[in-house]
Image (spheres, rainbow, N blue to C red):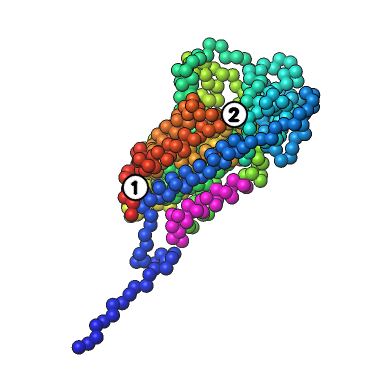
Amino acid sequence: MPPPRTPLRRSAPRAGDVRAGAPRRSPTPAAVRWLIGLMIALIGTITLSGTALAAAAPAPAPAAAPAVALPAQSQDGIDVSGTLRDQNGQPLAGVTIVAARDGAPVAQATSQANGRWELTVPAAGSYTFRLDESTLPPGTQVLQGETTREVAEGSLNTVVFRFGEEVQGAATGGFATFLRLLVDGIRFGLVIGISAIGLSLIFGTTSLTNFAHGEMVTIGAVVAWYINVVGGVQLIPATIIAVLVGAALGAANELGIWRRLRRRGAGLIAQLVVSIGLSIALRYLILIFFGGRSESFTDYTAQQVRNYGPIALTDKDLSAIVIAVVVLLGVALLLQRTRIGKAMRAVSDNRDLAASSGINVDRVILFVWMLGGGLATLGGVLFALSELSSTVQYEMGFRLLLLMFAGVILGGLGTAYGALLGCLIVGILVQLSTLVLPLDLKYLGGLAVLIVILVFRPQGLLGSKARIG
């Protein structure tokens, strides 16, 4: 009787083996959603915890000093800065700003020719910042010359003083405050939506979660600032140039990094890690070339507040809303009525089927990257104008990234309309949360929404269910 044959064993596929027939499992969309959400929640929790701990850290009591003398500013303290511009938008030079804690002055500064000032407080905590109105030029109308705010270590601490005439006839009371915050939330949500739609479209066509998308937002504002301030170009054409630069950078990202990684068979997790590294590298490159201080545009810095019933808006706030609505309607028409829009939706639904039907998938993905880069840079300029008092900061995109992810996941990853809906909800909740939360913790609402959605509806409001495993 012949001995039984020993069955042949197949060797396990090696890591990175992309030969035809090699078995390979990729994470399901639902698993990717959970991984993305957990990473974002972890980053947001660490950021918020660090800010809260810095703000709550006990500060040494200031040493007793004569009323006319101020303690020396410590090099180990915390920098606080701002820019002074009068009711006509002109910089105020030679104005004294005093920082006090528990009624005792601890630091002071004098504004420079461009209105810029900076001082150093000894430690984190609550400080009162006051303008010395005797140093103001004649005819300057001060609307708010004293403000109290929390100074936190490790964050950009900016103080804004308001100039101009008191708005007459503005509605007051709880309901009027609610309406104003609601409109502010809609404006903020539209700005987040413009910035985040590209993030959602990139995920839909490539399944890539791009953590470097926030730096594209920052680059848009920084490029517009350089063209506006250094180049002396008015802000509107500077913004158009910045959008073109953002589209070019999006194309460079796709051609130089992501297309090469896809052709080498890199997995989604590997690409995600690359995007995190790219985000960190870009952020610190911006810090090196732009600096860590807040810088102001030369246009649209100080504007008169106009009343629309119980709602008060400046012209730049209203312009940001109109621009965002027009651009988002244009993106919707692009997706629904044009050939490239239909091709984008086809690639998002099934990339292999789209390729077999004659669609040039690589060209569609390249267009998505260009569109996402342009929208992100436009969102950066609008974010700086409407939410940061016309100032540019090197980490502004990173601060917005958490809210962009919260809006995209809330609406449904990979869907443009879901991203818009989710970002509107997040923007409204963030602004309304200031009714019960301190102003420095208003972004906590976005993180809370992200966690709740991941627990109860991980596919998002407009997303489709996917099986894990």
| Residue pointed to by mark 2 | 389
Name the kind of residue labelled 1 in the image: Asp
Q: Secondary structure at mark 1?
A: helix
| Residue pointed to by mark 1 | 349
> Observer-nearest residue: 217 or 461?
461
Is 409 located above or below residue 387 in the figure? below
* Residue 374 appears anywhere in the view: no
Q: Nearer the viewer, mark 2 or mark 1?
A: 2
Which SS does the magenta portion mostly show?
helix
For label 1, the crowd category at 10 Å Cα-Cα, with few meaning under 14, some 14 to 19 and many 20 or more, is some
Residue 239 lies within the magenta run: no
Residue that appears at 73% across and 26% down: 105
Is 329 located above or below residue 245 in the figure? above
For label 2, the crowd category at 10 Å Cα-Cα, with few meaning under 14, some 14 to 19 and many 20 or more, is some
Evaluate if marks 2 and 1 touch, with contact meaning CB atoms under 8 Å apart.
Answer: no
Q: Residues in magenta?
A: 264-285
Image x and y of residue 462, in percent:
35, 38
Residue that appears at 39% across and 68% down: 13
Residue that appears at 49% across and 40% down: 402
Residue that appears at 67% across and 16% down: 141
Image x and y of residue 466, in percent:
32, 48
